[in-house]
Image (cartoon, helix red, strand yellow):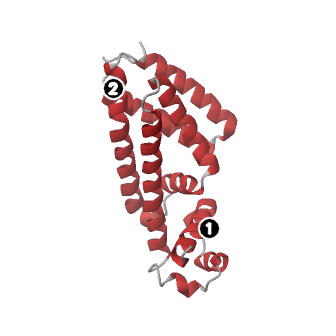
């Protein structure tokens, strides 16, 4: 593994655990086994490293979504959407990149807020663009109600996704499960009528 990749991998763990403020370049360098100055060979500073990790994490999440769609697009839409949400929860619990991504989107460093928000909205727009055709196809196939419209049904689904993320961060497992179960039931009942 190259030093650049080691720096990014170790930095991701530090930022995922402690956020921007809780991560130090000195500790990152120490964990990589290099001097702090060596980080500057690859990045101008902490901000550039952080923003690169933010961009990388966003791209990894889009790859996850694309792969999920490719592997599940022929499943019934109810199973597809439900499992997408379940896998999103699992990814948060098991994946440093996903944990970093979500933490960064919700708690960006104030001086990087504008740049992080831009990347976050680009991700959400891409996610919506990837899901709209799936929901539209389910409407054409008669799996879900076509009077709602695929854009509205997708936006509502992403509202559930957002709510689940909030509970993953703030609520803990019981609140997350309660929010997930209730939101899913109401959403599914609404689009399957």
Q: Position of residue 2 (x, y in %)?
A: 54, 76
Q: Total marks drawn?
A: 2
Neighbour tally class for label 2: few under 14, some 14-19, many 20 plus, Cα within 10 Å:
some
Q: Residue at x 51, y 35 (%)?
A: 84
**Residue 60 higher or lower than 46, as above or below:** above
Report the mark closest to the observer, 1 or 2: 2
Q: Quadrant of the N terminus?
A: bottom right
**Residue 80 higher or lower than 170, as above or below:** above
For numbered disc 2, what is the local secondary structure? helix
Instruction: Please name the residue that numbered disc 2 is placed on.
Output: 137
For numbered disc 1, what is the local secondary structure? helix
Q: Residue at x 36, y 56 (%)?
A: 118
Q: CA distance from mark 1 to mark 2?
A: 45 Å
Q: Position of residue 183 (x, y in %)?
A: 53, 26
Which is nearer the eye, 103 or 74?
74
Q: Residue at x 44, y 25 (%)?
A: 77
Neighbour tally class for label 1: few under 14, some 14-19, many 20 plus, Cα within 10 Å:
few
The quarter holding residue 38 reads bottom right
Closer to the chain start, of discs 1 and 2, is 1
Q: Position of residue 148 (x, y in %)?
A: 33, 20
Q: Position of residue 43 (x, y in %)?
A: 46, 78
Q: Quadrant of the C terminus?
A: top left
**Residue 140 higher or lower than 60, as above or below:** above
Asked if the residue at tag 2 contacts the one at tag 1, i.e. Cβ–Cβ closer than 8 Å, the answer is no
Q: Is residue 2 visible?
A: yes
Q: Is residue 21 visible?
A: no
Q: Which mark is residue 22?
A: 1
Q: Residue at x 44, y 67 (%)?
A: 52
Q: Which mark is residue 140?
A: none
């Amino acid at each position: 593994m190259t030093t650049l990749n080691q720096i990014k991998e170790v930095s991701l763990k530090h930022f995922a655990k402690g956020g921007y403020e809780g991560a130090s370049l000195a500790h990152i360098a120490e964990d990589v086994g290099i001097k702090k100055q060596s980080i500057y060979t690859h990045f101008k500073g902490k901000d550039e490293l952080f923003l690169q990790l933010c961009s990388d994490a966003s791209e990894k999440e889009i790859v996850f979504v694309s792969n999920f769609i490719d592997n599940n697009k022929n499943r019934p839409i109810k199973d597809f959407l439900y499992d997408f949400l379940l896998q999103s929860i699992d990814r948060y619990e098991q994946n440093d990149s996903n944990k970093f991504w979500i933490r960064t989107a919700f708690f960006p460093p104030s001086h990087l807020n504008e740049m992080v928000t831009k990347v976050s909205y680009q991700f959400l727009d891409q996610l919506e663009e990837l899901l709209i055709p799936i929901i539209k196809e389910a409407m054409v196939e008669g799996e879900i109600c076509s009077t709602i419209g695929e854009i509205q049904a997708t936006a509502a689904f992403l509202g559930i996704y957002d709510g689940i993320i909030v509970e993953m961060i703030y609520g803990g497992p019981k609140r997350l499960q309660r929010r997930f179960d209730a939101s899913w039931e109401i959403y599914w009942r609404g689009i399957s009528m």
